[in-house]
Image (cartoon, helix red, strand yellow):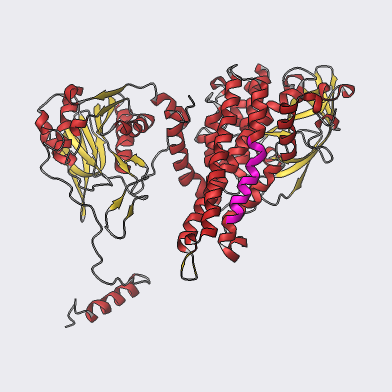
Amino acid sequence: MKIIACVKQVPDTTEVKVDPKTHTLVRDGVPSILNPYDHYVVEECVRIKEETGEGSVTVITMGPPQARSALMRCLALGADEAVLISDKAFAGSDTWATAYALAQAIRKIGSFDMVFCGQQAIDGDTAQVGPELAQQLGIPQVTYVEKIEIDDKQKLTIHKQTEDGYHILEAKVPILLALLPPTSFQPEHPPMSSILKAKKKPFNVWDAKTIGGDESRFGLDGSFTQVIKTYTPPSRGECELIEGDGKDAAKKLGEVLLKHEALIKR
Amino acid sequence: MVDYRFTEEQELFRESIREFCASEIVPKTEKLGEVRCMPEDIIKALAKFELLGMVIDPEYGGLGTDTVTAGIAAEELARADLSCSIPVLFLVGTSWGHVIDKYGNEEIKKEILPKAIKGESIIGIATTESDIGSDLGNMKTKIVKKGDKYVVNGEKMYISGVAEAMEYGGGHVTLARMTPEKGTRGMNMFYLPLKDTPGITPTYVEDIGREAISCGGFDIKNVEIPKHYLLGEENKGFYYIHEGYELARGLISLVCAGAASKALENGIAYIKERKAFGKPIGKYEGIQFKLAEHHVKIQALRQLGYKALWTYDQEIQGKASRFDVSMAIAMAKSVAPFWAIDAIDDVMQWQGAFGYTKECEDQKAWRAVRSFTLAEGSSEIMKLIIARELLGKEFLAYR
């Protein structure tokens, strides 16, 4: 299995604070981390590679030179090769322009069986890059994937989470999968020996010229959307926390809903 | 030019060990209590994350890292375990594992190091006696050669990890007089296994802090050890043993920095929230001045500690002298516990009456860090080393 994992370096949102006056994110001094969804993606890719017994895992990200540390962490988690696409031409990319640049880089990498993305990144939470990347690569996609079984090297059984359960789908490669971390997921912490090995693995840095394509589709020029402002919406009302076991809490909830005329008693 | 950056591997390692500590160590420390013996699951977790013996040659199961990287581990473990019990287990095993790696013969290295690295046994240090601490040249424990063995008699006291060695196996790097008339030039350094060793009788004392690692001693009565347990050459033990102490002192500096920086973070969170006279106490200059002073001292301490270990690494590579190492290490260790105690003490003060209760996490660090004015070389000895290097050996008071 030749696997490509798309990852992103994000600000640690547990450290991000909101300016109480402007309601915008204060990112100064906030550490950057590997998007937690992508952490799981890399571990899952390595697991699939080891299970199928052959192939490789290439991790790819678009970002500034500092994004190298996120890729190095992926290599320490067991990925085989890293690609950082980095160029001022990519600045201001929205999800569509990002997906275009990633698609160009993946074409340069060559053949692949599976492309993985995290379901979403914790900074933007758009969940758009995966589906848009599949569109640009012209391959099928499944999102909200919680479990993958490889029946043989061509056929996959995929558990896709839905609001009320799962869809169990069969699919063939090549395919793009956007993964949710399972609820039981405990991320691995690469020990020093894995970090030392990571340093010896291939690490490629590609600019806009290297990945090729239509330069007018990169960065701000290639973006259909722009982030004007990020803010916390004002509170819409008072919040009442209902405590107690299920039966009592349900009864209290019913009373509150009746009181506010959200329910009508017959 | 001076380059203050850690390597890319070290930065990744710090990120990874901080996460490891948050998920694997911190939850365990909440249940530690006053167990007076490191729980096995913690030792195994440290081993699984490859922290035990990280500076040891890969041939024996280690990683062969430099000591600066071990310093990162020491600092992060102290941030995670403010009682500093786990950091003590780590720093002692690292320092004396390094000494066995350097001075032990092939037979003992293969016998001792892989097990300790896997967390199946522990490595400690035992030089102190009931009446002898810094004045090692006058210790009572003696070692004599008897055929192809050595026989040891004496006692050791105020030793970390005695219960762990008795419970899980392992032993201590020990010092004894072989040629008493030669003073410090007549001492042997050797490995002394404790568990199931005839003639070893352990005793225990209760430290006021570091409650999750044992402190005690052992009587040594006609204990026979095989010849290959001798570390290095006969009569040179006093000199070898200082290489272990210097590494341990460098690591202790960063344990102090780690515990103090975590306490200060706790303090910052507290003074932002706690209100007095209508506003958060962090708004008062009396608090802010202290906060700023402690931050500067902790950062300075980190610089001193990492510089000390960097110098230690430079000496291993033949790029620094013993003078450089002794000076750098003693400078860091001489101030580390005091600066850390001052910071933690003020954090406790900011928390008012709560700060003096056992509910307050920071008091664990306060009690633990106090031990480092004594452990692995007292603060007074650190100052004597600095003065010796500045004035010359002819000014040593005890000559």
Q: Is residue B280 above or below residue A53?
A: below
Nearest the viewer among B161 and A22 is A22
Q: Position of residue A174 (x, y in %)?
A: 16, 30
Q: Residue at x 48, y 30 (%)?
A: B4
Along the horizontal axis of the image, is B219 left or right of B57? Answer: right
**Quarter location, residue A37:** top left
Q: Position of residue B239 (x, y in %)?
A: 74, 23
Task: Count up the numbered dots.
Answer: 0
Q: Residue at x 63, y 52 (%)?
A: B366
Residue at the far bottom in the pictured view: A266
Along the horizontal axis of the image, is B378 left or right of B28? Answer: right
Nearest the viewer among A190 and B164 is A190
Along the horizontal axis of the image, is A211 left or right of B37? Answer: left
Q: Residue at x 67, y 35 (%)?
A: B169
Whether residue B20 appears in magenta in the rendering, the answer is no
Q: Is residue A191 above or below residue A231?
A: above
Q: Quadrant of the C terminus of chain B?
A: top right
Residue at the far right in the pictured view: B181
Q: Residue at x 72, y 21 (%)?
A: B231
**Quarter location, residue B38:** top right
Question: Would you say residue B235 is visible in this rendering?
Answer: yes
**Magenta region, mostly helix, strand or loop?**
helix
Q: Position of residue B367 (x, y in %)?
A: 65, 51
Nearest the viewer among B151 and B335 is B335
- What segment is highlighted magenta in the picture? B332-346
Nearest the viewer among A41 and A105 is A105
Q: Position of residue B395 (x, y in %)?
A: 80, 28
Question: Would you say residue A110 is visible in this rendering?
Answer: no
